[in-house]
Amino acid sequence: MSRAEAEHVETIVVGAGQAGLSVGYHLTRRNCEFLIIDAHGRVGDSWRQRWDSLRLFTPAQFDGLDGMPFPAPAGRFPTKDEMADYLQAYAQQFRLPVRTGLHVDSLSHDGTRFVIAAGQRRLTADNVVIAMSNFQQPLVPEFAASLDPTIAQLHSSRYRSPAQLGPGAVLVAGAGNSGAEIGLELVRTHQVLLSGRDTGHVPFRIDGPAAQLILSRMLLRGLFHRVLTVDTPIGRRARPRLVSRGGPLIRVKPEDLAKAGVQRVPRVVGTAEGLPLLDDGKTVTVANVIWCTGFRAGFSWIHIPSVRDGDEPRHRSGVVASRPGLYFVGLHFLHALSSAMVHGVGRDARRVAQVIANRAIAAAEPVTTSTEHS
């Protein structure tokens, strides 16, 4: 197909992770025509490419998408490869039309339809669902370039195992869920300093028997899914802080870090003489730094005026009012704190799929005119 030619699909879903597949499932149930496109070679590769020992932060009973429970005992925390294989099986089970190896370069609107450019391919659509998380472009502070070149540096997105690091102390910059989990793994082979603000933590063992039966449901399906939403006053107040700083530690507790020998230090704010400089004015001598400092949203490829505020999309629970037909699913706190979690994405996908179905019905209705008779 030449660059001038375009393939038209009623709805294009960008991203074949849990968000995109959830949207596909609900579009299928509403008999909507759609295509899911993804840059990876296989469904689930976004999970396969994460660090080797990663397990989901939620137990298996919360890790299934609508229509297909996760195939594991309820209290077990699946591995990242098990999650990847589950997503691949999900796409096959529901015969979702997924086209892999297609990286989107730009999204625009020609006044009539959405236009997606992906390499030499050009696709048009009446609706586009961007089913991707905010976690697209690794975020590393600019001062990282000023560290002594002998200090090995990795962003968490490139970390796979302790074998990547050289001997000597490790500074894990960022004390959220990823930083805490990576720090616990590395302390078995390295001295580990964990820097960053305290994000808070779930005040009970989510892998304990009582949590499996009662508390995890109250937390994940109650607080995260129904209380902390854009529809509640408490959710609206909490959202800015949770979006900017991330959620609390779910599985790891501060005492776990202390018991294992992980040393907590203040936040890294710069460099001094090639060493990491902490918020208390002290420097630390380390041989390795892992930046668990988050990601940029990575939506600069959306070339539609009024859709983005900087690089962050403007929407209401995933629906973009300024450009009818454009939607987001999978963003952190899109509608609720659970929106980027596997157990929470289905509700957002269902809502967006219904809006798309309603829009198609409205477009198909004939226009009637009344005639006055004397």
Image (cartoon, rainbow, N blue to C red):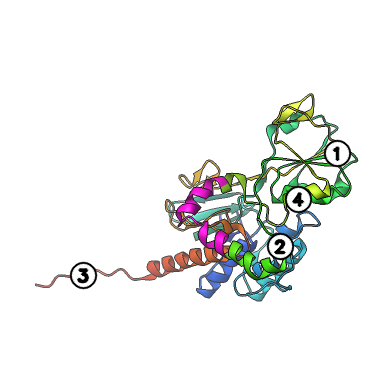
Q: Nearer the viewer, mark 4 or mark 1?
A: 4
Magenta residues, start to end: 222-241
Q: Check disc 4 and report its element: helix, strand or loop.
A: helix
Q: Amino acid at mark 3?
A: Ser
Can residue 233 be seen? yes
Numbered badge on residue 255: 4
Q: Residue furthest right?
A: 167
The mark closer to the camera, 2 or 3, is 2
Res. 90 image quadrant: bottom right
The reply, left or right, for residue 257 in relation to residue 189 is: left
Q: Earlier in the sequence, mark 2 or mark 1?
A: 2
Residue bearing mark 3: 370
Screen quadrant of the N terminus: bottom right
**Whole-percent x, y for residue 352 in the image:** 49, 63
Q: Nearer the viewer, residue 144 or 306?
A: 144
Q: What residue type is disc 4 on? A: Glu
Kindly identify the residue that appears in the image at 46 percent across and 58 percent down.
325
**Closer to us: 268 or 206:** 206
- The prevailing secondary structure element of the residues shown in magenta is helix
Name, please, the residue furthest toward the left.
Answer: 374
Location of residue 342 in the rendering, given as x and y in whole percent from the top left corner: 63, 63
Q: CA distance from mark 2 to mark 3?
A: 54 Å
Residue found at x 47% / y 65%: 356
Circle 4 packing at 10 Å, graded few (<14), some (14-19), many (20+), is few
- The residue labelled by disc 1 is 169
Nearer-N-terminus badge (1/3): 1
**Residue drawn at x 70%, y 36% as measured from the top left:** 267
Magenta-span inclusion, residue 121: no
Q: Secondary structure at mark 2?
A: loop
The residue lying at 68 percent from left, 68 percent from top is 210
SS state under label 3: loop
Q: Which residue is mark 2?
A: 44
